[in-house]
Image (spheres, rainbow, N blue to C red):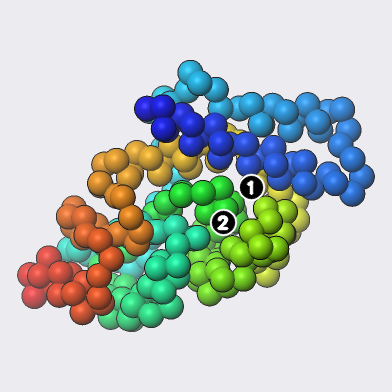
């Protein structure tokens, strides 16, 4: 419980960070500064993920929702192994099973650090699965650049993420709104914690195939498990 509260407290501060960073050129007004301070203190020691309603979080999915097999990927946008999966095996999975309607594919974010949460806020900003998965592929393709920008400098990483959002067609006001929405960020963290606990996720990428959790694996092994679950 303490770990969950601490994670929420640290990550919700992201909202204040982005609000402050967007004010650097002109300086904050008294009202803006008060809002930033509120965001920075939004998570308190009395609040745990179990107390947060996560029903507003949209499951991002592709394929056939009525398929006999559901594959859930748990991944972090800052995880190199996840980027490797999306550069190779995922493309095969999409061609063989998602685009053909043989599976229902669900992507769930894991937050190991604030940068992964920032990336998630950008990916979810437009609210549609099509844009979400498009930005997800951009994030993984450019992970080695944006996640290491400025030698890990938060301000430079934030700006690189904004650039990806703009390339995906999001305007500046929309991006800042998504990045500074403390309630949404807190809800995403609680959602992640609940999912990870339920499915026993302790590494990324991990996969849940019809209710059974597996660690990262070769594509041939995954395909075999999917075929077995489908009864083929």
| Residue 98, image quadrant | bottom left
* 158 versus 218 height, above or below: above
Counting other residues with Cα less than 10 Å from the Cα at mark 1, is it few (<14), some (14-19), or many (20 or more)? many
* 89 versus 136 height, above or below: below
Q: Nearer the viewer, residue 124 or 22?
A: 22
Residue 227 in the image, given as x and y percentages of width and height: 14, 73
Residue 57 in the image, given as x and y percentages of width and height: 45, 44
Q: Quadrant of the N terminus?
A: top left
Residue 165 in view (yes/no):
no
List the residue tagged with mark 2. 119
Residue 63 in view (yes/no):
yes
Using the numbered discs, state the Cα–Cα distance from disc 2 to disc 1 in whole angstroms: 11 Å
* 161 versus 17 height, above or below: below
Q: Secondary structure at mark 2?
A: helix
Q: Residue furthest front?
A: 151
Q: Residue at x 12, y 65 (%)?
A: 229
- The numbered disc on residue 178 is 1
Q: Secondary structure at mark 1?
A: helix
Q: Residue at x 65, y 40 (%)?
A: 15
Q: Residue furthest left?
A: 231
- The numbered disc on residue 76 is none
Q: Residue at x 50, y 21 (%)?
A: 45
Q: Nearer the viewer, residue 177 or 35?
A: 35
Q: Residue furthest right?
A: 26
Q: Residue at x 69, y 26 (%)?
A: 38
| Residue 41, image quadrant | top right
Residue 201 in the image, given as x and y percentages of width and height: 29, 49
Residue 40 in the image, given as x and y percentages of width and height: 66, 31
């Amino acid at each position: 419980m303490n770990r969950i509260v601490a994670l929420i407290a640290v990550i919700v501060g992201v909202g204040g960070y982005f609000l402050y960073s967007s004010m650097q050129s002109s300086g904050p007004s008294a009202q803006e500064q008060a809002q930033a301070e509120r965001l920075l203190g939004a998570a308190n020691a009395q609040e745990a993920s179990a107390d947060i309603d996560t029903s507003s979080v949209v499951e991002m999915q592709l394929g056939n929702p009525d398929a006999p097999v559901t594959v859930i990927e748990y991944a972090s946008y800052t995880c190199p192994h996840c980027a490797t999966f999306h550069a190779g095996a995922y493309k095969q999975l999409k061609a063989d099973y998602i685009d053909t309607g043989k599976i229902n594919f669900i992507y769930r974010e894991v937050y190991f650090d604030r940068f992964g949460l920032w990336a998630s806020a950008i990916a979810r900003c437009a609210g549609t699965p099509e844009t979400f998965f498009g930005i997800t592929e951009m994030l993984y393709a450019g992970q080695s650049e944006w996640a290491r920008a400025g030698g890990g400098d938060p301000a430079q990483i934030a700006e690189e993420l904004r650039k990806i959002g703009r390339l995906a067609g999001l305007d500046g006001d929309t991006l800042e709104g998504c990045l500074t929405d403390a309630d949404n960020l807190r809800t995403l963290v609680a959602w992640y914690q609940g999912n990870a606990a339920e499915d026993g996720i302790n590494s990324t990428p991990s996969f849940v195939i019809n209710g059974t959790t597996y660690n990262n694996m070769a594509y041939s092994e995954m395909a075999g498990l999917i075929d077995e679950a489908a009864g083929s």
